[in-house]
Amino acid sequence: MKFVEEVVVDAFLPTYRAMLAERLRERGLTQAEVADLLGVSQSAVSKYAHGEVEGHPDVKRDERVTALTDRVAEGLADGTLSRVGALVEAEVLIRQLEDGDLLARLHEEAVPELAEADATFAVHDAESTLRTSEQVLASVRRGLRVLTNVSGFADLIPNVGTNLVEALPDPTGIEDVAAVPGRIVDVSGSATVPGDPAFGVSEHVAGILLAAREAGSDASAAVNVVYDADIVDAFADAGYTTVQFDTEAADAVTTAVAGADLEDGEPFVLYQTGAHGVEPITYVIGRDAPTVANAVVETLLR
């Protein structure tokens, strides 16, 4: 008797880890860094690097395994994918391969009687909440890289700080919106991100996004920058719809967005010109964090 999990352990995991270790080393990571990311010893990484782990040829040849390895290695190397996110992505593919696919076939080879049985092994949901959450967090990290890797972004940070947010599908409150804890701040002319993105840590920018969605927008992300008439004009000249709202009016954002002529899926700009005790702010709203980050960079910094 052999369980499909044993096939995963014996055939998939050694092959996948060896492939992933090789990709990470190619991206300049040390053996110690690779070992930490993979949760294995440095001696294991050394064996992977020297080809001492042969791996299963069918797993090596599978294009989905290769694509996953490249995607996870890139995300782990540049910091946009957490170790939890990497684990979830691998877990999802494993469960797909168990469901009448590669691992199911290898299981049948190990247990020939299974070939005559009507059985499947789909035990995990590929659209799990954990996977979706990790994808949103990874998206925010990618957007942050866009903003912080360009010169001049610190000059666009308002006194209250900047935040980059992205919501889960069908969010019901700020706990469903990922953001930077403590906001992005200007430290001696450098945009500084104080912590890794997390859910439920933004009230202001997350609230603006949720209000826009309540008005019918299909946007899932937002970022705030300083307000200036020239900034709004630059967005308008670049083809973005600009929408003003009154901070002192009830349901101001919802009312303004509901009355605007917005195209589905297209980023747009919200802004308010300030009030007593309220700093004027510009908000870029769009489908995901990299989209709104790129809108800021391409419109205002290039």
Image: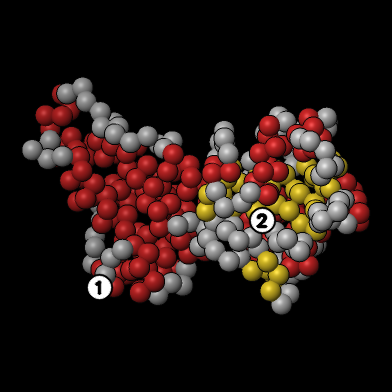
Q: Residue at x 19, y 51 (%)?
A: 10
Q: Position of residue 111 (x, y in %)?
A: 12, 35
Residue at far left of view: 1
> Quick check: can you spot residue 152?
yes
Q: Is residue 209 left or right of residue 34?
A: right
Say left or right for 301 vs 163: right
- Judge the density around disc 2: few (<14), some (14-19), many (≥20) Cα neighbours within 10 Å: many
Image location (x, y in percent) of residue 66: 40, 51
Q: Which residue is mark 1?
A: 43
Residue 246 horizontal/vertical position (percent) = 85, 42
Residue 300 lies, in percent from the top left, at 81, 59
Q: Which mark is residue 163?
A: 2
User: Mark 1 or mark 2: which comes first in sequence?
Assistant: 1
Q: Quadrant of residue 167?
A: top right
Q: Residue at x 66, y 39 (%)?
A: 210
Type of residue at label 2?
A: Asn
Q: Which one is in front in this view, the residue at disc 1 or the one at disc 2?
A: 2
Type of amino acid under label 1: Ser
**How many angstroms separate mark 1 from mark 2 (CA)?**
42 Å
Which residue corresponds to the image point at 67% horizontal and 43% vertical from the top-left? Answer: 207
